[in-house]
Every structure is written in structure tokens, then in C-alpha cells.
Amino acid sequence: METPDPVDSYDYTYSDDYYVYVAPPEASENFICYSETINFFLQCIAILVSIFHVVVLLQKSVRAASIFIIMAGICVSDILNFSIDLCLDGAWFPKIYKISTIDCLREDYTIFNLTYEFLKGILNSTRPIPVFLAIFMENIRLLTLMFPLRPWSQKLTSRKVTVFQIMFIVVFWIAYYFWNWCFLSSLWYPNNLCNDTELRMYSKNVTEYVIALPTRISDLVETRESMEHWVRIIPTIFYPILTAQLIHELKVINKQRKSKHFHEDHEHDNLPKLIFFMTISFMLSEGVDGVRTMIMVGMYNWKDEFPVVRKVLLSSHNIVKTLRCLNVISHPFICYAMSTQYRNTVKRMCGCKVATVKITPKAELRNNTSRSSLGSTSRTIRP
């Protein structure tokens, strides 16, 4: 009997009933795959809708109101956040940053990728900025309803004060996510190699400057990231409190308006409703993500326990992103439905005529048979 050649021994013949078994993808894997595709299109739609939204909000007839100035800031933050998220994802667009191949830097420093960390910092900072701008917007509305005749209340709604508050919130969160940049160093690589003999041998001929961050600062950044869920949860706790106070004030004001002598438009009623709707939307998108992230922090200690909960948490990231996309997409439509200023501005931009509203005193309707007519006043709704 001949001994088969070693190479020929790998030449197998399979029987007819042999097949390669491939396990079907799990439901969670299918969900993640489809939801990522859906979120990509939702993010693109959200960016386009937000661009139109911010163009309307920057019109002269609209930007005079402090509420709409704040909404413009929210809109710009959302555009930046979704755009950078698409760039960092890399699944749909090529990466615009390079991954460093240097692996023998001294132990007390960590390689710092400037482009990636800059995009990541902008992505992180533009996430809480819209939330805190929404809190600020609701505070303005609440204070102006509670103290309408106070001089400081009028100053609070001025354009200068509003812009100053927006800049304060933006600078605060940029500083919160970029403070570690103050500790960056430029190191000449061959003079700052690690103690590993084998790695030093391969890296001694690499001559270039590298941007590095001290390891102790890098550890502080990791600690900050592990507490990121509180940035989502804390604002969500304050939202219901402010909303409850706002609803109480609105009920008081609505009772007072019933005794007025003129039929008025619903501008003052619709604007708080707009703020209330945005508050609920932010609570759903930010609060759910905060609770989810807090649970995931302790998930790594579960080992093999709770596999179903682990899969749900890992796949729920796309659900949160979907909620955020739908929240952002809804803003211009809600503004159009509830704000006369916004609606008239959109109509002017589209070349449509702005409707006029007649305001007729109630006294005339009651006494038109016993006294001379008081006449009717006609005016155009001016934003």
C-alpha cells in the first residue's frame, strides 16, 4: 500500500450529504445591522432639516425673540453632533484621521491623536449643549411668566443677555471636554522610548515628533468618561420640576385671560406648549441614554451573568440614536404648527402671503344693539 503524499493528504472528497453549517445571525445582530442603516438615513435627514431650521431661525423677523435665538443654538449643536458622528462612525464615510503605529513610547505618556480627539471632543460637547440650552430656554419662559413686570425679567429676555448665556454654556462644556489639551506635549520619539528591549530595537530608527498626554491626565479623562452618564441623568431630573412649575403658571395665566376684553391669538399659549414638547423629547432621548449608560458601567462586572440584559443594553444604543434623530427632525414642524412668528417667516421665504387677523372687542358683540359700534381693529400678525 502506497503512502499518500503529504500534500495530497489535504485533498479531501466530501460526500453528497455534507454541508458547511453556518449559524444564522441572532435577532440582536439583525436588529443592530438594520437599525444602523436606518439611523444613517435618519441622521442625514436630521442634518438637512436642521439646516433649513436654522436658516429660518436666523431670519430678521424671528431672531429678535430670545427663545428663537436659543433654538438656533440648539440647532447648530445638533448639526455638528450628527455630522461628526457620521464621520467618526467610518462605516459610511472614510476616516479623516490616521491611527498611530507607534507602540514604544515611554510609560508615563500616552499617544494622543489630535484629529480624532478633537472630533471626539466636539462630539461630546455638542451632546449636553442642546440639553442645557433647553433648560435655559424653559427657565426664561418660566421667569417671564412669574415676574412679567420686573425690570430684570425684561433684561433676561434681551438679545445681549441671551447670547451671553448661550456663549457661557458653550464655553463651559468645551472647557469640560478639552481641559486635558492644556497638558499635551510634543516628544521626539527616539529619545522617549519605553523600557521594552525588543520594542526599542524596532523603534530606535523611527525619527518623528509625537503628541502625547501624561498618563496621570489620561487616567483622569477615563474617570470622567466613566461618569458620563450623570451628564445625561442630572438634567433629566431637573426637567420635570421646571415643566411642572411652567404648567402651573400657564394655568394661572389662562384663568386671567378669560376675563380680558379682546380675542387674542394663541401665540402665548403655543410657545410654552412648544417648550413643553421639546422638554419631553429631551427627557426621552437623554434620560434613557443616561440610565442605559449607568447600567453599562457595572455590566462589565457581571461576567457571564444576565446575557439577555447584556444583549439588550448593547443593542439599545441605536434606539437612543433613533430617538434623538426623531426629536431633532420634529423641531421645525412643531415650531411651524405652534409659533405664528415661525410660520409667517416660512411663508414669506416660500413667497406666500401672510394672513391677517381681525380682533373684535367682546363688548361690541354684547352691546351692538344698544350702543354705537365700537368698530373692529384689523392688524397683520407681525413676528
Image (spheres, rainbow, N blue to C red):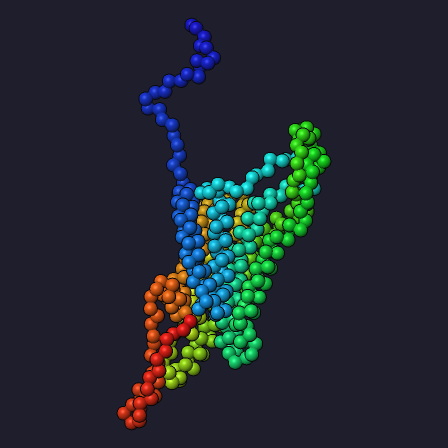
Q: Quadrant of residue 333?
A: bottom left
Question: Seen from this angle, which residue lies furthest bottom?
Answer: 370
The residue closer to the viewer here, 238 or 307, is 238
**Please, which residue is most extreme toward the top here?**
1
Q: How many marks?
A: 0
Please name the residue shown 37% across and 66% down the image: 348
Above or below — where is 9 with respect to 167?
Answer: above
Q: Residue at x 59, y 59 (%)?
A: 171
Reply above or below: 322 against 98. below
User: Residue 86: percent from the left, percent from the top?
Assistant: 47, 47
**Would residue 164 appear left or right of 199 to someone viewing this image?**
left
Task: Please tell me which residue lies in front, 119 or 248.
Answer: 119
State the image quarter where residue 56 is shown: bottom left
**In the image as oriented, which residue stretches furthest toward the front?**
351
Where's residue 354, x and y in %? 35, 70
Of residues 331 and 54, the one nearer the viewer is 54
Identify the residue at horizontal 50%, vertical 69% (top origin): 66
Which residue appears at 35% of the width and 80% of the height? 378
Q: State the image coordinates of residue 346 (x, y, percent, origin top left).
A: 38, 64
Residue 138 visible within the image: no
Q: Is residue 47 left or right of residue 160?
A: left
From what the image shows, is residue 222 above or below residue 343?
A: above
Query: Which quarter of the figure is the N terminus placed in?
Result: top left
Depth check, front residue: 233 or 108: 108
Quarter of the image for residue 191 reads top right
**107 relative to 298 in the view: left or right:** right
- Residue 155 in sight from this viewpoint: yes
Quarter of the rendering occupied by the C terminus: bottom left
